[in-house]
Amino acid sequence: MLSVKGLKATVEGKEILRGLDLEVGHGEIHAIMGPNGSGKSTFAHVLSGREGYEVTGGSALFEGEELLDLEPEERARKGLFLAFQYPVELPGVNNTYFLKSALNAIRTSRGEPELDAVSFMRLMREKLKVLHLDDSLLKRPVNFGFSGGEKKRNEIFQMALLEPKLAILDETDSGLDIDALRIVADGVNALRSPERSMIVVTHYQRLLDYIEPDYVHVLAKGRIIRSGGKELALELEEKGYGWIAGEEAA
Amino acid sequence: MSGPASNLGALERWLEGGAERLPGSGLDWLEAERSQALARVRAEGVPSARQEGWRYTGLKTLVEQPFVRYAEPVTGVEEEDLEEVLVPGLDAHRVVLVNGRFVAGLSSLGALPAGVRAGSLREILESDPDAVADRLTKVAGDGAHVFSALNTAGMDDGFVLLVGRGALVERPIELIHLSVGMDEPRVAQPRHLVALEEGAQASLIERYVSLGESLYCTNSVLELSLGRAAVLRHQRIQLESVNAFHITGVYLSQGADSRYLGVNIGLGAAWARTDLVVRFAGPHAECDLKGLYLAGDKQVMDHHLDIDHGVPQCSSRETFKGVLYGKGRAVFDGRIHVAVDAQKTDAQLSNKNLLLSRNAEIDTKPQLEIHADDVKCSHGTTVGQIDPQMLFYLRSRGISAPLARRMLCLGFAGEIIEALGPEPLREYVTEVVGRRLETAPLE
């Protein structure tokens, strides 16, 4: 589904990604772990097309098509979804209107008809329930005045609604208490399917107790330096990042 | 009407043309007002850029236009033509003026409650001038700017609404000022008067629209007089032709305990100047004035607020927002004056602007002049751009950049648009504003 080869990117002239390789197959969940500053979030942002990053080398093929040439909205319409580490507040932008615009943009690009108001509301109610979110959220401006937990749940709620092929969860666990984490993880797990892949970017192993990955990769200094099964996460938790970084240096 | 030693230059022609006499000729008081106004405009002439109130506006383009007065009423606008400019689903008592003149055939006032009169200024001046004698030209007074004086000299029709003591008009009253292009560029100088007696309530929707994109000028004056505890909701939507010039002076006098809820939406015209002048005549009156303006390529949007707290214990809120794009230009000049006896005044003025392009320009100038010592007054202005993080967030959900910008701008303007009502009017404005923003050039 996703094939990243030799990806290099700079931020303000500073090289952050230095030849990153990653293969994600259909239905797989990949965890990317790494210390602060290793390039985890940069990787997520570069894939989703955020401004401010310059890709200086490599490629990222998504279903055989070069992602890096596409505008952010085109990537989203092809089935890419980024759950933000810091969801952006949009004062004055009604959540329902936002969700409807997003869903219809994606449906239209797939050649599907726009949803009528009744079917749309039904779909939203159904997805809200999964994330234990209240109806009132729909009437509020997007993320505006939401608690940290509500923002993260709203991200997963959007993911449930938009049904991407590949979801990137950027530190979705950060700032969540254990109850909120469980709700978010349940929401994510409900979306697991043989057609949907996920990249879970996290600093801590904790999230992976709830969202069980098929593969774990360790990112350091802009490259994946180690890959393994889910047991790699446990090993990391036990020995710390210094363990691998040390091994690298040796 | 060619007088000696006039400083009016090309604007002199605004008063020429047409054999038709002005309404109310022969009424001493009105003749006196007219000749006084005429003497004033001829003496003062076109304001210069050295005058503070005109520093940023630039009258050159206006003065260069060879506008002449409409010689006679325009006939031939049909019901179908009107359809094009109606707000879908809006239920209202409707009054239609075409090029400044009342057209009975297009108006549908319907049944008005007892104690309410609505109709043409020309008709009232001919049939019952006493009904307007104590207010017409008096509300605007001598402080009115020179274009309003020009309107006084040249007014030949307009809309009058008189709501008697305690009367309540439930349905909104919609005033549609429709402009239709003529072979020669023309100027219309409609004069409107709305007077609510003690305890009266009404809702006025004032709209300026056009058929086609012709060049013309509207120089309107609206005098609003609110008696004790009267309540007026006033929504003004300026959607003139893209090539038009629009000048308006709104003069509001508020009695004790009265409430005024105003929303001003400035969208159209190549060049638009709006003056909103508020005078408090009695304590405990409230004035809530909101505004939204859009200025795109080749557009100048100029708003001047002059809020005079001359008596104690009144409150005013002035909340104006602007979205500028392309090479659009806007001016916001908001002045609040609190007199020495106007204790317990509560006045807050805010002007926020969103610039979508580097070539757009805003001059914003809030002024508080406070002479009383026990008051609550504040002002604030901001000029900003669309937050790229917000834009990216929307795009990352599949929403195109133009739609994302539209959503964010409407979000910014939401506070003002939300104040519009009833629903069909709000939807109409949202749609017009949204469409403009989605196609707005960013350079």
Image (tube, coloured by chain):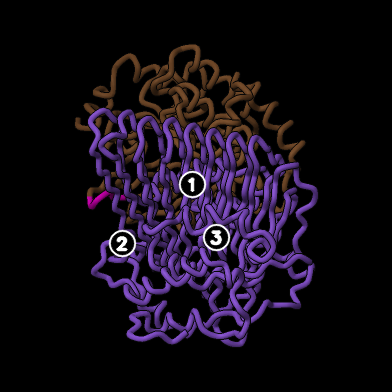
Chain colours: A brown, B purple
**Which is the main secondary structure of the residues drawn in magenta?**
strand
Image coordinates for residue B241, horizontal then vertical, percent: 57, 71
- In the picture, the quarter occupied by the C terminus of chain A is top left
Which residue type does callout 1 highlight?
Ala
A63 to the left or right of B65: right
Residue position marked by numbered label 3 in the rendering = B238
Residue position marked by numbered label 1 in the rendering = B413
Q: Residue at x 23, y 30 (%)?
A: B373
User: Which of B387/A158 is in front?
Assistant: B387
Which residue type does callout 2 highlight?
Gly
Which residue type does callout 3 highlight?
Gln
Q: Are marks 1 and 3 in contact (CB under 8 Å)?
A: no
Residue range highlighted in magenta: A9-13
Q: Any mark on residue A235, and which? A: none
Q: Are marks 3 and 2 in contact (CB under 8 Å)?
A: no
Instruction: Tell me if I can see residue A98 in this picture.
Output: no
| Residue reaching furthest to the top | A179
User: Which of B295/B207 is in front?
Assistant: B207
- In the picture, the quarter occupied by the N terminus of chain A is top right
Q: Are marks 1 and 2 in contact (CB under 8 Å)?
A: no
User: Which of B57/B8 is in front?
Assistant: B8
